[in-house]
Image (spheres, rainbow, N blue to C red):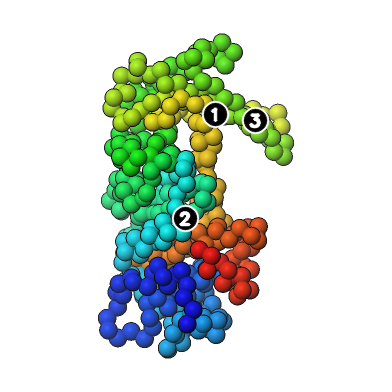
Amino acid sequence: MLQSPIKDNFSDLADPRDENKRHNLIDIIFITICAVICNADKWEDVEDFGKAKFFWLKRYLELRHGIPSHDTFNRVFAALNPEEFNRRFLIWVKSMNPLIADEIINIDGKTVRHSFDTKTNTSAIHMVSAWANKAGIILGQIKVNEKSNEITAIPELIELLELEGCVVTIDAMGTQKKIAEKIVDKHADYMLALKGNQGTLKDDVELYFEEIDEKNYDTQIVDYDKHVEKDHGRIEIRECWSTEKIQWLTQKEDWKNLQSISLIRSTRIIDDKETTEDRLYISSLHANAQKHNFIIRKHWGIENSLHWVLDMAFDEDHCRKRKKHSAENFAIVRHVALNMLKKETASNLSIRRKRLTAGWDSDYLEKIIFQA
């Protein structure tokens, strides 16, 4: 019987069921991951996929009692320990894609909107994920506790990740002293957005940059970069001012390894309408306007390459799985599937088309599950 990376990495999961079980746990997991790769978004879809691909699946699985019912899939994933499942996911990611130098890792949260349950008064789950821009994969995720928020979940996720030599970007909610310290302790750098959640820090940085003009500032003090993009009648100008001359900043010593501050000014011109937005950042990196401008642009990778894809290609926001751990575990399955689909680059298809093609073409599905 042929072996697969899915079986290599998920076979040792603890089975949550009692001794009366007709189907192997790894068979259930294998079928589910393959089905989700092939455009299945509901438990009924997973069962239908298994029945349609039964003889193909028999090449890899025992399937002693055929394909499980959709109720069986639901019960197993509702009972499966999500922390252990996530741990195996993290080990698999590390084995498939060791991080490269200067990787930009975006950390951000997303709510699975229809995973709430009014019958049990259970809120929709909120997952915080880490996205590696250069590798184009999800490094890990963690569910936010119902009685907590991203501020407590982000340090837990950082603790699970290998970050040495990387740059971590987080939106303003994650701009916390303990989070910055956790990143530095992982031998990584941070680029954190500033808003009004850190006392006077934002006001002080904003005041410093107020008088800057790229034509007359002292280049020994402030570094400057300008990037222009033109696309379908839209012009976007992104300017960055960055300095590490911040001895005047009274809060400097409160942030571990704080080296520089930056201002990003985004100007968008669509037809005759022009809008401008300023954003402020603190960083453990030395001042380098071109590098900071690039890193901050890449922060939107988690929105464009992960959250948007999960919504548009996987229809995640309409997922109605609610039973116990079902929604959280299915979110991890989607991340496994997305990583496998992202790693297949030879076809140059969109994620949506890859999912459809894998469902139609077993050879292509094999290519996806064996190259990861």
Asked if residue 194 can be seen in this view, the reply is no
What residue appears at the point 54 percent right and 28 percent down from the top-left corner?
Answer: 290
The mark closer to the camera, 3 or 2, is 2
Q: Nearer the viewer, residue 39 or 253?
A: 253
Residue at disc 1, secondary structure: helix
Horizontal side of residue 354 vs 326, given as left or right: right
Q: Nearer the viewer, residue 33 or 58?
A: 58
What residue appears at the point 52 percent right and 15 percent down from the top-left corner?
Answer: 219
- Residue 345's x, y, as percent? 61, 58
User: Local crowd at mark 2 within 10 Å, few (<14), some, or many (≥20)?
Assistant: few
- Residue 350's x, y, as percent? 63, 58
For label 2, the residue is: 97
For label 3, the residue is: 228
Horizontal side of residue 59 vs 143, given as left or right: right
Q: Which mark is residue 290?
A: 1
Mark 1 or 2 closer to N-term? 2
- Residue 211's x, y, as percent? 50, 13
